[in-house]
Structures are given as structure tokens and as C-alpha cells.
Image: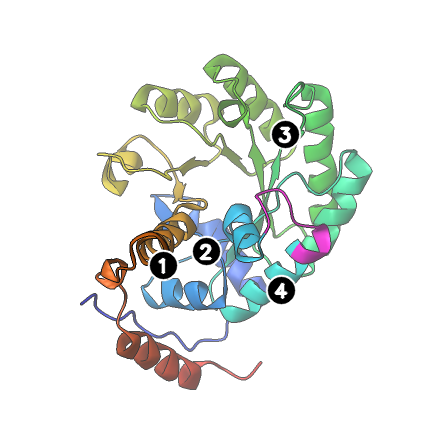
């Protein structure tokens, strides 16, 4: 049986969360896992992680939508829910800012900041397979708009600039680095290129954008450990929708065994109900009244 996570009862203010989140990026390397609902957020907090990040895909699937298929209102409601559920800083996977133009991105970011998040990422993908990335000038203007919106609100929220090259079929490390450096100049506090896999790619990005911190996505099985990744100079490691996919994997295997073969084998690795009940019962008692 997996050891039950530790409960945390400290009600941390938004300002304190944002301050501690920035401090996490100053040295070393930390893991920022991605819950998709209140229960997963509380469990991850109990395990001792120092910050959390939402996952657009994990949340979308929980609502019966594909990734990038939720509305801005749905995303904002989810951010409110996760921020209220945990005492940890929360980084928002804010997709494309729910707008094409810079003004729309700024408005969306303003609303996101009001949820109490400590960080927020803006992607440069368009959703158009024929033209999957925004032209770099527009992509930078979108980052600048997000930066202005954050600064107007106090400037505490960390802005993450995302270069989606590797995820949209353009795995060009030169273009990726060019975009990340431009986003840093446009005001991004942290840089992120999901899809990097090799040590050479990771080192190239870390060196190119230094001293800005780099987020690395690891959403697949790999021989690299967090210590290995830290040695490459990465400041933070996220897992995107991987934990949600792992949970869905268990569900799908059990459901298919039952539907296709009439067997219950899929329940062999199920978490014990008594363990879940025990954690959440104790956790409820320790939560401050908000």
C-alpha cells in the first residue's frame, strides 16, 4: 500500500503563494505535478509537492471535452476551484489565452490573475493545422499583452512563454530557441518548450535562455530522473496530462475487461477505498474555513 500523503492545514494568502512560487524558480529544480480536480490537487499537496499546475487536457477530459475544447469561462471556473482547494501556488495551463489578438489575451489574463493563481502560461500555437504557430511578431505581442495585464494587477504572477514547435510537427530546435528568446525579451519570466526529449535539446534551451528558468515537460516513461534533469539546469518539471492519462489508463483497462470479456481483472491495482476515505476524511478536518 502506498503511504498516505501528509495533510497540510495552513491557509496561505495569495501574495504569499505568489512570493513562494517565484522563490522556487531561483535555484535548484522542483517538480510541479498537474492535478485535474479537487481530489487530485489535495492528494498531491498531501504528498509534499511545493506547487501545482493545472492541465488543460486533464480537465477537459474530466468534462467530456477534448484538449483545447473548453471555453474560457470553464477554464476560469476550474482555476478558481483548484486555487481554493489547495494551499500551494498554482500555475495555470491557460492554453492560447482564449483569444487570437493581443487585446483578447490581455483580457483573459486579467481574469485569470483574479482567480488567485501564482503563474500562467501562454502558448504560441494557433489550432490551425495548416499554420500551426503564430508568426513570431504576433506571438511576442501576445506575450507582451499578457505581461502588461499581469503588471497592471501587481506583477506578482509569473508569466510562462511556451514555444509549441515540437508539439505541432515543427521539431526545429533552432526555431524553438529563437521563439523562446523572443518571448523572454517580451516579458516571459519562465520559458517552456513542451516536447523536448533529449539531453542535447534540453541543454541547448537551458543555455540559450539563461538566466531565465526553464520548465521541462516529462509526460512519458523515461530513464531520466529528476536529479538527472536538475543536473541539466532545468528549474522545474511538469507532467502535463500524464497523471490524468495514467488514471484514465486504469479506468479504460478495467472498463474494457468488463465490457469485452466479462472479467473483473482490471480492479487488481485499484486504490483501496479505505485509504482514500481515510485521507479525505482527515484532510477535510484540517482544511481552514475560507
Marks 1 and 4, how far apart at CA: 20 Å
Q: Main secondary structure of the magenta part?
A: loop
As drawn, the residue found furthest toward the left would be 1
In the picture of the structure, the residue carrying the numbered disc 3 is 124
| Residues under numbered marks 2 and 1 in contact, where contact means CB atoms less than 8 Å apart | yes
Quarter location, residue 59: bottom right
Quarter location, residue 29: top left
Question: SS for tag 3?
Answer: loop
Residue at screen point 68% across, 27% down: 139
Q: Is the residue marked by circle 4 packed among few (<14), some (14-19), or many (20+) residues within 10 Å?
A: some
Q: Is the residue marked by circle 3 packed among few (<14), some (14-19), or many (20+) residues within 10 Å?
A: many
Question: SS for tag 2?
Answer: strand
First in sequence: mark 3 vs mark 2: 2
In the picture of the structure, the residue carrying the numbered disc 2 is 52
Q: Is the residue marked by circle 1 packed among few (<14), some (14-19), or many (20+) residues within 10 Å?
A: some
Residue 230 rendering spot, x and y as whole percentages: 30, 37
Marks 2 and 4, how far apart at CA: 14 Å
Q: Give residue 49's mark.
A: 1
Residue at screen point 41% across, 83% down: 286
Marks 4 and 3, how far apart at CA: 24 Å
Residue at screen point 79% across, 33% down: 101
Amino acid at each position: 500500500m502506498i503511504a498516505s500523503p501528509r495533510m497540510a492545514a495552513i491557509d496561505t494568502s495569495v501574495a504569499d503563494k505568489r512570493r513562494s512560487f517565484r522563490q522556487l524558480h531561483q535555484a535548484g529544480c522542483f517538480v510541479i505535478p498537474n492535478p485535474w480536480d479537487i481530489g487530485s490537487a489535495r492528494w498531491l499537496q498531501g504528498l509534499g509537492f511545493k506547487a501545482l499546475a493545472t492541465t488543460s487536457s486533464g480537465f477537459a477530459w474530466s468534462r467530456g471535452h477534448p484538449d483545447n475544447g473548453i471555453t474560457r469561462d470553464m477554464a476560469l471556473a476550474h482555476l478558481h476551484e483548484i486555487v481554493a482547494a489547495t494551499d500551494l501556488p498554482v500555475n495555470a495551463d491557460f492554453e492560447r489565452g482564449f483569444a487570437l489578438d493581443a487585446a483578447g489575451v490581455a483580457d483573459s489574463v486579467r481574469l485569470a490573475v483574479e482567480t488567485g493563481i501564482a503563474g500562467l502560461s501562454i502558448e504560441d500555437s494557433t489550432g490551425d493545422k495548416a499554420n500551426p504557430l503564430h508568426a513570431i511578431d504576433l506571438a511576442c505581442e501576445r506575450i507582451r499583452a499578457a505581461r502588461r495585464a499581469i503588471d497592471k494587477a501587481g506583477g506578482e504572477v509569473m508569466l510562462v512563454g511556451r514555444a509549441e514547435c515540437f508539439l505541432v510537427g515543427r521539431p526545429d530546435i533552432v526555431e524553438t530557441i529563437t521563439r523562446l528568446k523572443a518571448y523572454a525579451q517580451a516579458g516571459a519570466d519562465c520559458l517552456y518548450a513542451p516536447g523536448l526529449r533529449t539531453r542535447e535539446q534540453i541543454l541547448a534551451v537551458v543555455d540559450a535562455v539563461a538566466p531565465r528558468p526553464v520548465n521541462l515537460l516529462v509526460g512519458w516513461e523515461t530513464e531520466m530522473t529528476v536529479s538527472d534533469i536538475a543536473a541539466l539546469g532545468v528549474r522545474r518539471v511538469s507532467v502535463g496530462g500524464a497523471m490524468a492519462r495514467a488514471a484514465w489508463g486504469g479506468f479504460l483497462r478495467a472498463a474494457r475487461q468488463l465490457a469485452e470479456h466479462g472479467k473483473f481483472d482490471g480492479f487488481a491495482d485499484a486504490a483501496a477505498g479505505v485509504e482514500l476515505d481515510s485521507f479525505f476524511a482527515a484532510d477535510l478536518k484540517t482544511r481552514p474555513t475560507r
